[in-house]
Amino acid sequence: MQRLKAGGWTRGYCDPALWPQLKAHFGPEFTVSTEYDCTRVDDYAFGITRAVGAIAESGTIVLNDASTSRRLAALAPWVHVAVFSRAQIFATIADATQALGDDQNVIWATGPSKTADIEGILIEGVHGPGAQIALVLP
């Protein structure tokens, strides 16, 4: 959580299933909620959620409705911390697609969004997190 502290991202949300494992790593300077309040969406600098997997070849984080506690907590804050195990890392997109089944709502996130469709000027972080952190737990 040093990266969150260094970035000044001290207010956020954590999936309640993850909080018991992570709580000891947060100091008193952090305000962490395990209830996501949609009316306070701008108050969250970070969101910590479970991911269903990650893809090594592209650095992609894979989220779905079955594993991600609050999809908005993964997509609205400036920083998303995706938590998964080493066993959930797939070598290729094909491997992940085959292993993940047929959930109807899957999000493939590979870093901050980018666009250059306005006068050819590259703009990052148009929607979704501006920073994505992968936290691999044993």
Image (cartoon, rainbow, N blue to C red):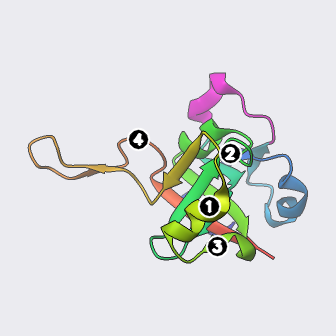
Mark closer to the chain start, 2 or 4: 2
SS at badge 3? strand
The residue mark sitting in front, 4 or 3, is 3
Residue 12's disc is 2
Identity, as a three-letter code, of the amino acid under mark 3: Ile
The residue mark sitting in front, 2 or 4, is 4
Note whether residue 103 is visible.
yes
Identity, as a three-letter code, of the amino acid under mark 4: His
What percent of the width, then of the height, locates residue 33?
Answer: 78, 41
Instruction: Please say if the residues under marks 2 and 3 sit with CB atoms less than 8 Å apart.
Output: no
**Cα–Cα gap, marks 2 and 4:** 18 Å
Mark closer to the chain start, 2 or 1: 1
Identity, as a three-letter code, of the amino acid under mark 1: Leu
Give the residue displayed 91% in from the left and 57% down from the top.
Answer: 20
Mark closer to the chain start, 4 or 3: 3
For residue 55: magenta? Answer: no
SS at badge 4? loop
Residue on which the image places disc 1: 4
**Cα–Cα gap, marks 4 and 3:** 25 Å
Instruction: Please say if the residues under marks 1 and 4 sit with CB atoms less than 8 Å apart.
Output: no
**Cα–Cα gap, marks 3 and 1:** 23 Å
Residue on which the image places disc 4: 127
Residue 101 drawn above or below residue 12: below
- 10 Å crowding of disc 1: few (<14), some (14-19), many (20+): some
Give the residue displayed 65% in from the left and 58% down from the top.
Answer: 100
Please state the extent of the stretch shown in magenta in the rendering: 34-43
Give the residue displayed 72% in from the left and 76% down from the top.
Answer: 86
Residue on which the image places disc 3: 89
